[in-house]
Amino acid sequence: MNIMDFNVKKLAADAGTFLSRAVQFTEEKLGQAEKTELDAHLENLLSKAECTKIWTEKIMKQTEVLLQPNPNARIEEFVYEKLDRKAPSRINNPELLGQYMIDAGTEFGPGTAYGNALIKCGETQKRIGTADRELIQTSALNFLTPLRNFIEGDYKTIAKERKLLQNKRLDLDAAKTRLKKAKAAETRASQLNSARLEGDNIMVNFSYMLNLLHVKWLKSEQELRITQSEFDRQAEITRLLLEGISSTHAHHLRCLNDFVEAQMTYYAQCYQYMLDLQKQLGSFPSNYHSNNNQTSVAPVPSASSNVIGSSALTSTSSLVITSPSNLTDLKECGGSRRARVLYDYDAANSTELSLLADEVITVFSVVGMDSDWLMGERGNQKGRVPITYLELLN
């Protein structure tokens, strides 16, 4: 029973305090009550904390979008984080693209130029995917987590103490209003008591009322001192917390440096991977042909392709590209010659013949054919072949 009485009394006291704050807040909004203003330093600290919170949230959310563009994946990660469970590992976009390229290259044939290039590109894309995964993990640990800890930890504490300060300020102003009203009532009662009134009963009643108002005034004054003390103490607590924002900025600066370093490492890795891939693809000849496939230009191997195979370097005197006289003789005589294929070549259309490096075919000239092409023959297969891919044999 005593516990119930205590709870009822506490509930009534809390309700009275809440009602007093609501009345004070409403009167302030209507301009009917005075409001205690915070000192300029504390106001600046509050503004700085609010600004830090807003921009930290924006930076954190946009960083999450940068690291994980898929909104569904972000929602899934958020749910697993709230459930305190580890999110399942999923393949990222570069890794998926790399796997598709490897599968396509395997099906087209690793021995073909296109298939081999696809496989090499796929392996590079997978390396980029691994680097991307490492960037996400490092950035989440060293950059996003500290920002999130500030929003969900430090700033929530600041917001809680700020709300308490607001309540203490309302209590203080309400106490000031009650004291002001008590003083006004006592002054009015004193004026009436000092007037010449007839009858002892009337004088006794006014004297009693005056004593009551004086007691109420003393009580209001004591309440004001208590609320002022509580407000000052809460203002000091809030100020100490807000002054920690400068330390938060210094900590976030270190985290930002870590994020920049992680990005620098990621882009350096990607650049090196693509540079290596470019060197590997440079060993493959490039094929250029018109869109209508009516007029074809013989592909020209890149300069780096001349380093493939020591035999290609040691037998440059027999290469067609360096021995135009051999080609001229072949075209003029109209006969056929044996030729070794230097590089893989995929036919662009049905009039051309696909080639495999190091195979030997028969080539001959056809009247009216472009000077950069010969007619190649392998068994019962015939088609045009680019002369820059051939080495005429004696």
Image (cartoon, grey):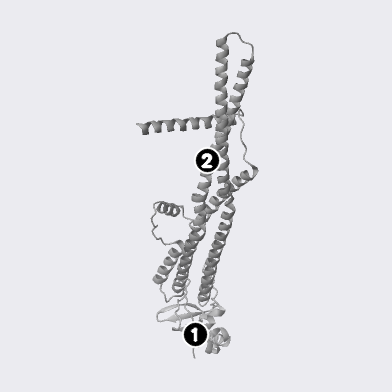
* Three-letter residue code for mark 1: Gly
Could you say whether the residue bearing mark 2 is in a helix, strand or loop?
helix
Q: What residue is at 47 percent from the left and 76 percent from the top?
A: 345
Q: Kindly tell me whether residue 29 is visible in this rendering.
A: no
* Three-letter residue code for mark 2: Leu
Real-space Cα distance between discs 1 and 2?
Answer: 80 Å
Q: Earlier in the sequence, mark 1 or mark 2?
A: 2
Q: Nearer the viewer, residue 304 or 184?
A: 184
- Residue 202: image location, x then y, percent: 56, 11
Nearer to us: label 1 or label 2: 2
- From what the image shows, is residue 181 above or below residue 353? above
- From what the image shows, is residue 16 above or below residue 62? above
Residue beneath label 2, please?
A: 164
- Residue 152: image location, x then y, percent: 49, 50
Q: Is residue 50 left or right of residue 122?
A: right
- Residue 284: image location, x then y, percent: 50, 76
Q: Residue furthest top?
A: 198
Q: What residue is at 42 percent from the left and 69 percent from the top?
A: 102
Q: Nearer the viewer, residue 18 or 74?
A: 18
**Callout 1–callout 2 Cβ contact below 8 Å:** no
- The quarter holding residue 214 reads top right
Q: Residues within 10 Å of mark 1 (few under 14, many from 20)?
A: few
Tell me, for residue 309, which label it has, or none: 1
Q: Is residue 119 left or right of residue 264?
A: left
Q: Residues within 10 Å of mark 2 (few under 14, many from 20)?
A: some
Q: Kindly tell me whether residue 235 is visible in this rendering.
A: yes
